[in-house]
Structure formats: structure tokens, C-alpha cells
Image (cartoon, coloured by chain):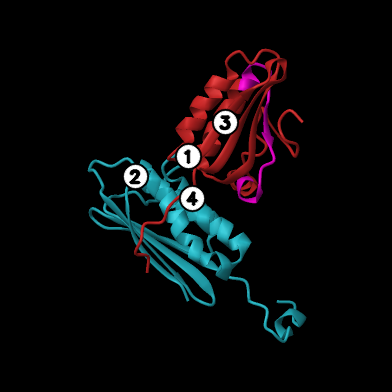
Chain colours: A red, B cyan
Amino acid sequence: VQHSRPERPEFELDVIRRGEDGAAIFVKGELDIANAAELDAAIAEATEDLGGGSLLIDFHACSFIDSTGLRAVIKAAQRLEERGRELGICRASGPVLRAFELTALEDSPGLYFRHEAPFS
Amino acid sequence: MANLDLTLATEANSAGEARAALEQFRDAIGPVAFTDLRLLVSELVTDAVIAESDEPVAELELRAKLSSECVRVELEQGAVAYKLAARRAEPGEPGWGVQLAQQLSDRWGVRRGGRSSGVWIEIYLPPRESSSGAEESRGL
């Protein structure tokens, strides 16, 4: 029986711009209903002045994503696709890939997956 | 065998609290089943948080029990969060958790009272390898 309050891991988002190379968002921790809006905001900020570059989201340090986090990612991919661009998902780990698979969102338009880190 | 009995506030942070509380089951049920269990429970808590309700809902009861054959989870809420939707829910919409329960669990059910609702799921566990390796030799 649980007596003490369980603590969730720390969550962090870093946005890095690289001029003509585009922008990357690094997600650390667990992405869910409590912070999906922050990813939404980070995506909006990162896609401003994207120029000819691409937008990448790195999930190397992300240990969990739920449907609200996926929804933010897919909405961003749709918006980019309408502008003839794509959203790259970098270094997604097991639980993150599993979430994409279970929601059947891995084949969404405007979305692609890569093993490499952003800007590598 | 592990047991969990937790009262959660019906708020966004509770999904993470529920996942953290499930950590005690990780080693016992294996990484694949645990990944699915964690996602499923998180989505069911989210269902309760984003449910359209006429009344404010204070608390959510989460209970989980591990036996040698399965892990059973029950969530009870004082509103009608858990119900079968007439149409397929999209990820992130109310009802996605219940829909995922149908997809991921071996047995599941929903229960609705006048002002409350609940959902239960059971995920069967793969047979554990015996020390003699006899089960492995039978292809289990």
C-alpha cells in the first residue's frame, strides 16, 4: 500500500536554433498532460523564423510520452507539412516509440524518424 | 505480491504520480508489460482529468494488485469519466484511455453508478522461467 506521494521525474525542454540548419527541441523527462502545453509553446517558438531549415525534436532523454504529448507533436507535423516541411523525431526510445505505434501515429504526414541526434 | 492503493487528485500532475507509484511492479512483470501498463494507467488517469463533467471531481482512487498470473488495476472516480464512447476517440481526447484499455489489456470492464464510474483492467503475465528450465523446454 502506497503511503508517501510518488514523485515524478524532472521535466525540461531546451530549444536550440542553428540558423539555416533550423531548430531542435530537446525533451528530458516524462511528457504528458501536465506539460504537453509547454511542448506546444516550444514548438511554436522554434518554428518562428525557421527559414529553410527543419524542425527536429530529440527524445533521447525522454522516458515517457502520452497521447497529449503525441497530439502536440502531430499537430506540429501537420502545420509543417502544410508549409511543405517535415518534423523529424530523433533518438526516440522504447516507450516513446511504443506510444507512437499504439496510436498509429508513426505514419502521420509530415513526420519522419531518425536515429541521429539533431545537427549531427 | 505487490499491492497499490492510492488516492489521487483529479488534476494533470496525477498522471505522473500514478506512473511513479507503479514503479514497484516494474521488476516483477518485465519491461514490455510494464511499458504498456504504465502508459495505460497514465491514459486512464488523463481520461478522468479531461472528462467533461457537470460537477467538479475531487479524487480518483487507483488500486493495483499483482498476482503470479496477472496485474489487475482499478480506477474509480466520482464522476462519469469512464464510459464507452459512441465514436472512436482520437489520442488526447476524452475516452482515449478506455479505448486503449480495450487494445492493451486481456480483460477489462467499465462500471457506472449514478454519480461515479470505474474501469478495471487485467494484463496477463508471461510464464516465468523455472530454475530447472523445464518450462522453457516446453516452449512456454
CA distance for labels 2 and 3:
25 Å
Residue B24 horizontal side relative to residue A77, left or right: left
First to last magenta residue range: A80-96
Figure check: A85 above or below B113? above
| Residue at the image position 62 percent from the left and 71 percent from the top | B126
**Residue A87 at x, y percent in the picture:** 66, 28
Residue A44 horizontal side relative to residue B3, left or right: right
* Chain to which the residue tagged by mark 1 belongs: B
Q: Are marks 1 and 3 in contact (CB under 8 Å)?
A: no
- Secondary structure, mark 1, is loop
The label nearer to you, 4 versus 1, is 1
| Residue at the image position 59 percent from the left and 46 percent from the top | A99
CA distance for labels 4 and 1:
11 Å
| Residue at the image position 63 percent from the left and 40 percent from the top | A59
Residue receiving disc 4:
B99
**Residue B15 at x, y percent in the picture:** 42, 49
Query: Residue B21 or B117: which is nearer the viewer?
Result: B21
Give the label on residue B11, or none.
Answer: 2
Q: Earlier in the sequence, mark 4 or mark 2?
A: 2
* Chain to which the residue tagged by mark 2 belongs: B
